[in-house]
Amino acid sequence: MEHLKENERMDDLEYKGLKIIQNTEGFCFGIDSILLAHFASDIKNGSKVIDLGTGTGIIGILLCAKIPSIQMVGVEIQEEVYDMAKRSIRLNHLEKQFTLIHANIKELEAKLEVGSFDAVVTNPPYKKNDTGIQNENPKKRMARHEISASLEDFIRISSKLLKEKKDLYMVHRPDRLVDILELLRKYKLEPKKLQFVHPKLGKAPNLILIKATKYAKPFLKIEEPLYVYEENGEYTKDILKIYGKI
């Protein structure tokens, strides 16, 4: 059993017995990470996958359970968060499958071989550094705002690391969709699949899931929208399926 530090808690992911360590005063994962791990579950067995901005490792841990033979690499800049991810990997006995790099993603071009990954997954900060209310907590601020790396950095590095015809999976906000599409094409990543996520029926989407393929031909498939909650506040059947409840 991993030792918990001050303000830390251990959460049960309610999936194949997985657990994760989080800091109650830091940025805790949300449903966006769960949805991205599900969206990316078509990654092929045996793939080498990198998670840019892995945080506490939630996406990588889930993908290791969903696709048992992938090799996962997570990159995290915040030392304390990196340490929690490392302990969560040990907690789930994934040391042989999931490794970590403590670095800014902008350093990866010097650390990793170009074109060496079969897939990239990322849940990057959603807000530009000069927009929105800045959280006073520096850990939360770095997770939410593009302080250490911009959206363009995440997409540029993804393109560099991916093999030809391989895929980037990203979760982001709908208000950044035009920026995302423009940057994907700039770095030769062709948008192939897009899904809007709505809090509930009748509400505007608050998340997008997007898959893009390096050097692919143009063709974008718009998936059926995903609704998170029913009118009574309970999860929809689609979300319960993703959580493995039905």
Image (spheres, grey):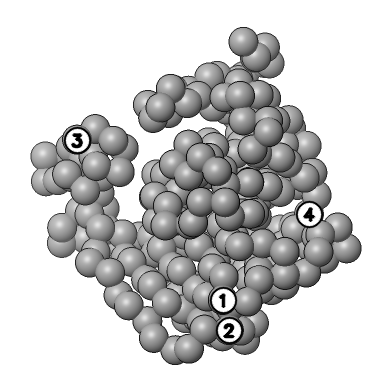
C-alpha distance separating marks 3 and 4: 39 Å
Taking 239 as reference, is 165 above or below it?
A: below
State the residue position of label 3. 246
Callouts 3 and 1 close, C-beta under 8 Å: no
User: Mark 1 = which residue?
Assistant: 165
**Residue 199 visible in the snapshot:** yes
- Asked whether disc 4 touches disc 2, contact meaning CB atoms under 8 Å apart, the reply is no
Q: What amino acid is labelled 1 in the image?
A: Lys
* CA distance separating discs 4 and 2: 26 Å
Residue 58 at what x, y percent from top left? 53, 39
Identify the mark nearer the N-term, 1 or 4. Answer: 4
Closer to the chain start, of discs 1 and 2, is 1
The residue that mark 4 highlights is: 104
Element class at badge 1: strand
In percent of the image, x 56 and y 76: which residue is there? 165
- The type of residue carrying mark 4 is Asn
Determine whether the residue tagged by mark 4 lies in a helix, strand or loop. Answer: loop
* SS label for mark 3: loop
Q: Tell me: residue 31, above or below residue 13.
A: below
| CA distance for labels 2 and 3 | 38 Å
Residue occupying the point 47% across, 26% down: 18
Q: Position of residue 217 (x, y in %)?
A: 48, 88
